[in-house]
Each structure stands twice: as structure tokens, then as C-alpha cells.
Amino acid sequence: MNNSIEDDSFSKPVGRCSVFYYGVGHMLNDITSACWFTYLLLFLTDIGLSSRDAAIVMLSGQIADGLATIFVGELIDRFGHFKIWHGAGSVLVAVSFSSVFGGCIPCKALATFSSLVETVSYSTFAAIFNVGWAASQVSHMSMVNCITLNSTSRVVLASCRNAFTMVANLSLYGIALIVFGVSTATTHSDIENQYRWIAYLSIFVGCCFVGIFHLGTKEPRSKTGIHGNIHVRISWSYWFLKILYYQVALVYVLTRLVLNVSQAYLAFYVINDLQMAQFAKALVPAIIYICSFIVSVLLQEIAWNGQRLKAYYTAGGILWMFCGVGILLLPRSMSLFVYAISVFIGIANALMTVSAVSMQSILIGEDLNGCAFVCGSLSFLDKISCGLALFVLQSYQSSSPRVAGNYSTNVYFSVTRYGLGLVPAFCSLIGVAVTYTMELHTSSSKPLMEPLLA
């Protein structure tokens, strides 16, 4: 009888305090990820690495992250303990992230600053950082499905998490603005010190929110049903036989490509292609994140079902397609229009991210003993695809920064312009097409007679 009551409460909407405590739990990952995608390539090229070597460093981190997500997801499905994995991953992120931007330690020990040693050193620390990042991400994402079975509450949790992702991004740009404003970099050592302080302050802010998460969020635990039987772990083949798994995986990967590629090349586009003032590379992303934050908060007030998820994702995808065309064709003489485009990018990012993550919850449904594998495998595909895409774009960036020119209209087509305009727009188009073919059915909220993780 008690288990039936507990299962019934497990299907009820989650309270706002619980939503808040969960939502802040990914802040450390988000603020370090924002720094990773926004400043890593810029930092490495500023200290003398070639564009290709910088791309190798990023790719090594993405590969380590992708492999770790599969491994961590399997272990979480076997043994549980979401908060332990989250805490351990957060510690590894906090310890290793400053070393990614902290200079070449082996170079100092070996008294050599060859490009090979520098590339290996930064790649190693990047891999360590991303292993910790993966442990924290997979445990936090999969926890949603074990906190509640209520489909609307799952979307609300994802919306809150995405809202604090925007807070993390804005916090990073605030930190960077302060650091760059109070210090001047004239040597490699000065550059390393600037980015080291950005890393330190980002870690401090993120760790504060991780502490709030661990104090306010209860550990989802195994539950035994009224007959005493316990769910066995779901095998990988169970998911591979579902068409919806491949559809959700493709939509999620395409969405992450939209976000990561646009984030990595936005600063290059604003400064190099449009030749705007330096403050624009902070203001344009800030507008995007503020708009995404507002939309993410508003999405928490909606009663969700499968059809609405498809509709909102489609709306976000169509917005990004128009934004991509605008980015591709925008001349320097009309560069101020990038601020208007950034508003719509922010709205599109929120709609696509919240919908894509929530589709995972519909895929998982009540099959909670396989939720970590689903999150881990999708993250694996995300990390590998994003790493390869950025590696290819950055390689062409070093060999042919300008593809074609039309100076009469102040427009030229660079790799940056193609990467920021075409890649996200094309990914959005494919994502919308795949979403249209999905059959999304939200689970019922009736009390469950089988034991679940809660």
C-alpha cells in the first residue's frame, strides 16, 4: 500500500523548489563548456599554436568526452548513485579545467616549447577535463527521468536546466569582460594569466551552484514494488530496436551541432567578417543568451505533450534557417542587423534545446533502468560529431580564410560565414524533417505497480 502511494506521488508534478535545485546542478559544466567553445580556439591560436593544432586539442577533448559518456552511462545503469557520479565529475572538472588554460606544464618541465609538446600537453588536460564533464553531464541528464514520470514536469526540469545554461553563459561573459578590462596582455604569459583567471572564477561560480544542487536535490533511489520484484537492467539492444531511438538521437545531435558550431564561430564572424567593435563579440552572445533564458523560463509554464514538442522544435528550426540566411548574406555595411538576428537565434536555441532534450524523456518513458545509456549514447554521438565538424571547419579556416569576395557590397564568403550560416541552418532543416516523422506519445500518469528508480 505504501509503495502504491509512493508511486502515485512519483507521477505528480514536481514542486518549484525541486525544479530550481535540479536546474542549477549543471552550472559548473555549462560555464566551463561556454569557455571551452568560446575561448579555447582563440586562446590556443593567441599563444602560438596553429589552427590545425588547436583543432586537434579540441577534437581530443570531444573524443574523450564521447567515450566517457558511454562508459559512465553503463555504470550508472548498473549501480545507480547519480549524485556520486555528478559530484565526482564536478571535482574532476574543477581540478582540471584551470590546467586547460593554465599553460604548458610539460613544456616547462622539459624546457622546450615545441608545437608537438604543447599540442600533446593541452590535448591531455582537455581529455581529462572532458571525462569529468561527461560524468557530471550524463548523471544530471538521466536523473530527470528518475525524479518524476510526469511528462510536463520532465519538460519543466529540462527548461529550468536550459535557463541556467543561459545564466552560466552570461556569467562567463561577465567574468571575461572584467578580466579583459582590468588586465592587458602583451606576452604569452599575460595571455595565459588572463585565461587562467577566467577559468578560476568560472570554477568558483560553478562550484557554488553545484553545492546548492547537492544540498537541495535528493538522490533518486531504487524502489521495490508491491510484489517485491525489481527491474532488471535494460540491454542496449532494446533501444537499438526502436525507430524512435534513432530519430531522437539524430534530432539531438543536429541540435547540439547548431548550438556548438554557432557558439564557436560567432566571435570570429562578428570581429573578422563584419569588422565590428571588440565589445560586439560579448554583446551579441549576451543578447542570444538573455533571449534564450527568457524563453526557457516561459516554456516552464506550458502543459506539454508530444505534438507540442514537435511544434516548438519545428518553430525553432525554421527560425534558425532564416537566421542562417541572414548571417550568410549580411554585408558589413549593415552589420548592426546582427543584433536583431541574435534575438531570433536566442529564441530558436531555447525552443530547439528544450524540445530535443525533452524528446529523450519521451523515448525513455518508464524504462528508467536504461535512461543513463540513452543519455550517454546520445551524448557520445553529440561529442564526436561536434568535434569532427569543428576540426574540419578549423582546418579549412587555416588554409583558406576567404573563399570568395565581393567588395562592392562589402560581402565575402569565408569559412567562418559558411560555418555559422550554413551548418546550423542545414542541421535545423534536417532536424525539422526528422521531427515531422516522429510519433511521440507521452506516458500516462497512473500509479505504477512495478518498481522504478525514484
Image: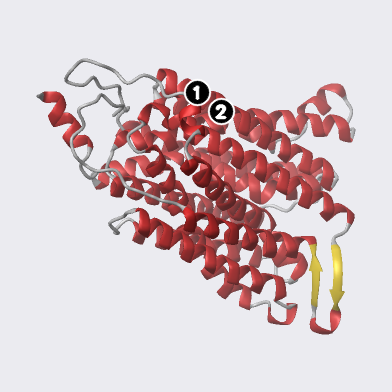
Q: Residue at x 56, y 75 (%)?
A: 340
Q: Which residue is mark 1?
A: 74
Q: Residue placed at 67% from the left, 30% from the top?
A: 127
Q: Nearer the viewer, residue 133 or 387?
A: 387
Instruction: Tell me the residue at 45%/30% (across/down).
Output: 372
User: Which element carries disc 1, helix, strand or loop?
Assistant: helix
Q: Is residue 321 left or right of residue 293?
A: right
Q: Residue furthest left?
A: 1
Task: Name the amino acid type tagged 1.
Answer: Glu
Residue at 76 percent across and 27 percent down: it is 105
Q: Is residue 429 above or below residue 140?
A: below
Left or right of 262 in this view: 377: left
**Residue 70 tag number:** 2
Residue 142 drawn at (x, y percent): 42, 34
Q: Is residue 33 above or below residue 184?
A: above
Q: Nearer the viewer, residue 277 or 452?
A: 452
Front-most of residues 336 and 140: 140
Q: Are marks 1 and 2 in contact (CB under 8 Å)?
A: yes
Residue 84, given in percent of the width and then of the height, sits at 42, 23
Q: Is residue 368 left or right of residue 267?
A: left
Let me know if residue 129 appears in the view.
Answer: no
Label 1 crowd (10 A; few <14 / some 14-19 / many >=20): many
Image quadrant assignment for residue 263:
bottom right
Dot 2 surroundings within 10 Å: few (below 14), some, or many (20 or more)? many
Which residue of the protein is positioned furthest toward the bottom in this rendering?
408
Q: Quadrant of the C terminus?
A: top left
